[in-house]
Image (cartoon, rainbow, N blue to C red):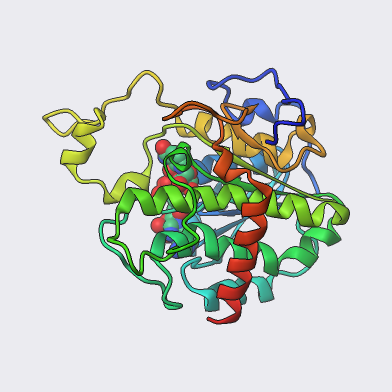
Amino acid sequence: MTTETPRLTTPFTARTTAAEILDGVDLTGRRMIVTGGASGIGTETVRALARAGADVTVATRDPSKADGLVAEFAGPGPGVVRAAALDLADLASVDAFVTAWQGPLHALVANAGIMAVPTRQLTPQGWELQLGTNYLGHFALVRGLHDNLRAAGSARVVIVSSGAHLREPFDFDDPQFARQPYEPWSAYGRSKSADILLAVGIARRWAGDGITANALNPGYIHTNLQRHMTDETLRAFGVLDEAGNRIDLPYYKTPAQGAATSVLLAASPLVEGVTGRYFSDNQDQEVADGPEPTVGVAAHAVDPAAADRLWAYAEEALASR
Ligand SMILES: NC(=O)c1ccc[n+]([C@@H]2O[C@H](COP(=O)([O-])OP(=O)(O)OC[C@H]3O[C@@H](n4cnc5c(N)ncnc54)[C@H](OP(=O)(O)O)[C@@H]3O)[C@@H](O)[C@H]2O)c1
């Protein structure tokens, strides 16, 4: 992620599926959590990890949504899938999840997210909902599970960000849109910049505990994430036709392809020890340049000073909730 370290390359492409990433990899005995695992990319992440033998907990607001996934792995084959309640927008729920988790944790995939919520909504703690869910909730979760990650001896944190981080740095002056007009896409982009800074912050703090952390952009995938977008906006994006049918643009991925980079970072031996980086299409990305970059990682999202400042902001936000 930083310019000093050489980029890691893998043999995989944008079209590689999550299952292909783990071909020949045995995850038996590894305990993992995937937030938002009952839908979209998260579901395919859970499937690939469990098929390789992992014991995966789907952390979801409504555990019954994972019933089908749990049942898929209820038989004698490799892998186990469980479901547990977690509302990232409510710290009481995050605390309850952390308290209930016992024993080591080998991988935490911070996958849950919401996008472009049309109006400024607040969490029970009074935080803007996209920041509260996508970043602050995951910060509280990962910090709460630190000892469990350390207990694994070698653990990985994977943060699902987005290419939308390129449009907006985290706004330290007004992180909650308290003084400026709320803008849904800005709030999303800023929360996703914060997510990458979270990976950098963990990498800077917890390497000595055997914990690595990396962030990623999964690409474009049709999922429930687009739930807040109107048909008009979807048409403007070119992904909905006049009859209301979904259009698969050439660069769109299937959910199984969209889950590949998460799975690579959570479990592939190819990235063992790699930390503090940002991946896209299964490749380590360089810092983007130019006025309006569309690929790579923004300098504002990998700035170590910003990562430390954001960590302090989050600590303070949690302390004063
Ligand atoms: N799809 C894309 O094109 C794309 C592109 C870039 C980045 N991403 C990122 O990829 C990740 C996965 O998104 P997706 O596309 O798979 O969308 P999705 O199908 O909507 O899945 C998102 C998941 O987040 C969960 N979630 C939302 N709010 C939550 C909360 N307060 N507490 C706990 N869980 C919550 C949802 O759970 P419920 O079932 O309870 O609603 C859902 O399972 C997100 O972080 C997203 O920003 C996606």
Q: Say above or below: 7 vs 36.
A: above
Question: Residue 171 appears at what percent x and percent y?
Answer: 46, 56
- Name the residue located 53 percent from the left edge and 20 percent from the top edge: 15
* 102, 162: nearer the viewer: 162
Instruction: State the image quarter where residue 141 is shown.
Output: bottom right
Question: Residue 247 appears at what percent x and percent y?
Answer: 26, 26
Question: Residue 31 appears at what percent x and percent y?
Answer: 74, 54
Split into 4 quadrants, where in the image is the N terminus? Answer: top right
Q: Is residue 31 visible?
A: no
- Name the residue located 47 percent from the left edge and 32 percent from the top edge: 219
Question: Residue 261 appears at what percent x and percent y?
Answer: 60, 33
Seen as rendered, the residue at the extreme left is 242
Q: Say above or below: 275 vs 121.
A: above
- Name the residue located 56 percent from the left edge and 26 percent from the top edge: 281
Q: Would you say 42 lies left or right of 109 here?
A: left
Q: How many marks?
A: 0
Instruction: State the image quarter where residue 8 is shown.
Output: top right
Seen as rendered, the residue at the extreme bottom is 320
* 131, 97: nearer the viewer: 131
Q: Would you say 232 lies left or right of 72 here?
A: left
Q: Is residue 127 visible?
A: yes
